[in-house]
Image (tube, helix red, strand yellow):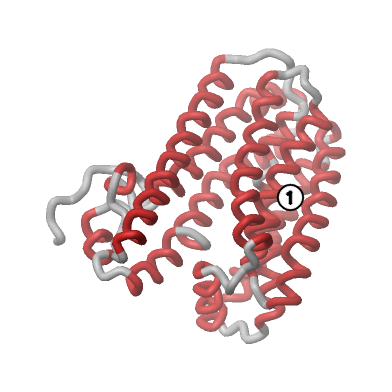
Amino acid sequence: MATVRRTMPFAIYVVLFAALALQGDLTGFMVCNLLVQLAVFVVGACLPAHRTGFMSYVDVAWPWGLALIGVQVLAFGGLASPAAVATAAIYLLMGIRMGAWALRFMVFKRLPGELPRYQYQRRRWERDGFRNEKVSLQVEIMVQCGANIAVLAVPAALATVRPAGLDAVSVVAIALWAVFWVFESVADLQKARFADRTRRDGARRTCDVGLWRYSRHPNYFGQWMQWNSLILLSLPVLIDRRPHHHIVFGLLTALALAWISWTTYHMLVHYTGAVPAEYFSRRRRPDYIRYQRVTNRFFPGPRRTTDQ
């Protein structure tokens, strides 16, 4: 069963990639992105992981892969469509922001050890009976590579064939993305300031100020909503293409867009996000268990007034 779970993402990637690559006007983008992502992940993650035994280098490859998706949107789609340019900018901003942090922390400052979320991943491998760590490292890295190839690139592929003009749905989607970009940025800034203050005080406390009073991971929620905004931005072109393409291709493309929301939620909550982070937070900060009891994990909401 564990082996099936491990291989299932690759089967989904193959189906979704084929569904888009077989649509003639998307073939060039999909094939180019396939080659670009393989190059980025092999050089940026697979080889360093093989040499050092650290999976954390995938945090360099993944965001820079997103940034390069944005570059490809501009190369294939041009500048005629404002919505396409906005899509490219979104990928560039998301990728460069996360990629710059990863380069600074893991390359220029030299990664001191495996990031906690990937230490937690090793516990999963042990639980599932995967004993060959070198193979597991490469498989897990390629799961994230496959996401950039076949799932997370779908809005970008559709953006390359957008007609000129900016419809109302696209305006709303771009505005929503900007709101949640700011939301995530504010959450990160609040936590950084809190960490600096507690470090000066010599204390180890859980951040529960600002947005962190209403969600234990508001930055993850903001990032998830940015992906949902990208899905919304893609809907007009998906609808416009419906009469001109086989219904199976249309359904699979729609499924790929829906899969973005599911897979980013799963990643940010269960895979490399909230669950691994909280496993270590409970052990490092005595007040974290109470914080869990009174604060929503992912979706922001009112704090509970009781520990029950």
- Dot 1 corresponds to which residue? 149
At a point 32% along the width and 54% down the height, the residue shown is 207
At a point 35% along the width and 72% down the height, the residue shown is 284
The percent position of residue 294, horizontal first and vertical second, equals 21, 55
- Give the residue furthest to the front: 200
The percent position of residue 257, horizontal first and vertical second, equals 61, 40
Q: Is residue 294 left or right of residue 14?
A: left
Q: Amino acid at mark 1?
A: Ile
Q: Is residue 297 left or right of residue 99?
A: left
In front here: 192 or 289?
192
SS at mark 1 in the image = helix
The percent position of residue 16, horizontal first and vertical second, equals 71, 48
At a point 64% along the width and 70% down the height, the residue shown is 55
The percent position of residue 283, horizontal first and vertical second, equals 34, 74
At a point 58% along the width and 47% down the height, the residue shown is 259
Q: Would you identify the image quadrant in which residue 24 lies?
A: top right
